[in-house]
Image: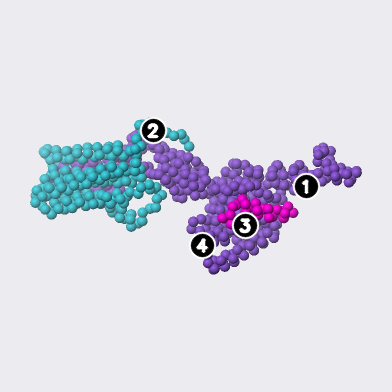
Amino acid sequence: MGTRIEPPYEPVEQGDSTVVNESWSHRLELLIYSTSAVAGTTLALGYALRRRWVYAVAALLLAGWSALIEPSTVAARRRPGRSVTARPLTRASTTVVRLVANMAGIVLAGFAVLVAWGLLQNVSAPLMIVALAAALASWDLHYFRRRLAEAAHVVAPRPIVGAHLRRLALVVGGGSGLGLLALFVRIRYGMGMVVLLSVLALVGLSRAVAYVRRASD
Amino acid sequence: MSLRRSLLIGLLIYGFLLSGLGTLSGSFLAVAVPLALYLAAVLVYRPYDVRLRIYRRLSHDHVRPATKITVDLVITNDGEDLEELLIEDEVPAGLTSDGDTSLLLSLPSGASHTLTYHVEGARGSYRFEQTQVTVSERFGLFRRQRPYPVHSRLSVLPASPSLRSLKIRPARTRGFAGPIPSRQGGSGTDFYGVRSYEPGDPPQWINWRLSARHPREIYTNQFEQERIADVGLILDARERTNVSTRDSSLFEHSVEVTAALADSFLHDGNRVGLLVYGRGLERTFPGYGKLQRQRILYALAMAQVGDSLVFDSLDYLPTRFFAAKSQLVLVSPLCDDDPPVLTRLRARGYQILVISPDPVDFERRGQAPSRTLDMAIRIAQAERQLRIRQLERVGVVVINWQVGQALDATVQAGLKRYLPQALRG
């Protein structure tokens, strides 16, 4: 038994240290709904401008589906005061939880397919970029909220949520900006250069994904 | 889950890149930029230097049942800043926790945090083994999970009801002064006999009345020496003898009695050893004092009912474990084939005291009365009385204890009933 170690940094305010602070949870939920709505409406708008009504409706339905799965996911995962030795979920409920948990990924993949199809149908590319960036943000926030719900106790949720949102805004905003910029920048390469850059991109991406998969548990 | 997520992002970027190359359209590449930046952020901020120091502190390492223990899990970050750290402490099965045993936090380099919760549990020995630690960057795509071994042990000792000093008379005692009459003349308080006066005898010990009747001889009173004894406690942990109901077990009462007996005998200064007989032979070698009391309580905390083909009957009771002609105290509900074994032990010179929690009475509790039940109880009690009589006939002292009754009163009354016989001993 050792002596108590005092934190060398400013301790977090106790009032903020609570089981997934409800207000933050609701704000995150609102953000998820908002980003899903932005993704759906932008995508639908793009298709509507090209008079592809079926796809516009499909985009809106996808956004609606995304909004529908959100509360059920957290409700399925949240078990207040649970301990590691808590009774495990039954096989059926585990399957349901897993299916519901992966819905967000399916929704993102659905948005990506609609975006790709839209680009092939000459739908406005800037709208597609915004739609996919919003879907990415919604997908990320969905998993973030789930991680917060999984922990019985979150120490200082305000800074954690704040830092997450700042970085997400930077990445998604920066990514959308760069993507939009890329649409208006024209650089001419020879065929050899295009092949070289493509190979580099594919190899680099393969290595990056492989590294994340290998190094992450 | 993070693997699937990273794979999904990777596949989407691949898809857009290949579509862009296939259609020679830059729009596909532009659409992939937010995804690529997301993946790049994951790689840049991934945790690569995870060095945590974790230790667990229990407010007590041994307690009585239904006592709340405060568990502090101190996590110190000796590595880089950790953006998301999920700590999940594994509570041993059998303990109930009050408070959160897992937490999510950001832990800067050099900082520490204490996870505090409370546990309580029934009698037993519990080992805290490890703590699950999951570290990830803010997007949770790159996650590292590993168990940290953080060992702690918590013993919930049995409750021991208080018991007054027990009057036992083993055939052989040890050399040190104590409370037990040793059947030897010498200095003491109780009259033992007379012998011829020897130079050096204190004058106040001279028996003047007897000496007056013998003009040529002087006689001196002798007193019975009081010494300490060797006491061997045997706890019967055989599954076949211990009745369990849904809510409680007779074995728990046996454990409590054994703890009370150990407490009482050690308090009187005796040398006490313990043998838990059932699943195997769990021995606590004889010793004295508070340390021995603690050893016995730890052994009792770990005692479990067990089933073993070898130790199904008391035939394999290791008598070499106990000092010759010492006092044996068996705590057992008793079963049919026990009396012959105890008779053999008695024949070898052991003084045997059996404290027998009544299994018939225990099982009767909580059952709706009926004529059939009454009849069954009468038959079972008759069999039990017969077994007890068999033992009493060979000089074994048996105290039948109905667990609802006060232990001390029952034991004292039972011993008093045998006292004249024991004195004749």
Residue B300 makes an appearance in the image: yes
Q: Which residue is mark 4?
A: B367
Q: Which chain is purple?
A: B
Q: Which residues are magenta?
A: B402-425
Q: Which residue is mark 3?
A: B400
Are circles 2 and 4 on residues that touch, CB within 8 Å?
Answer: no
Chain designation of label 2: A
Q: Alpha carbon of mark 2 to alpha carbon of mark 1: how far?
A: 72 Å
Q: CA distance from mark 4 to mark 3?
A: 21 Å
- Establish whether labels 4 and 1 are both on one chain: yes
Percent x, y of residue A165: 25, 39
Inter-mark Cα distance, 2 to 3: 59 Å
Of the two numbered discs 3 and 1 on the same chain, state the one appearing first in sequence: 1
As helix, strand or loop, the secondary structure at mark 1 comes to strand
Look at the numbered disc 2 and give the secondary structure of its residue: loop
Identify the image quadrant of residue A156.
top left
Corner quadrant of residue A13:
top left
- The chain under label 4 reads B
- Percent x, y for residue A112? 19, 48
Q: Is residue A60 magenta?
A: no
Marks 2 and 3 share the same chain: no
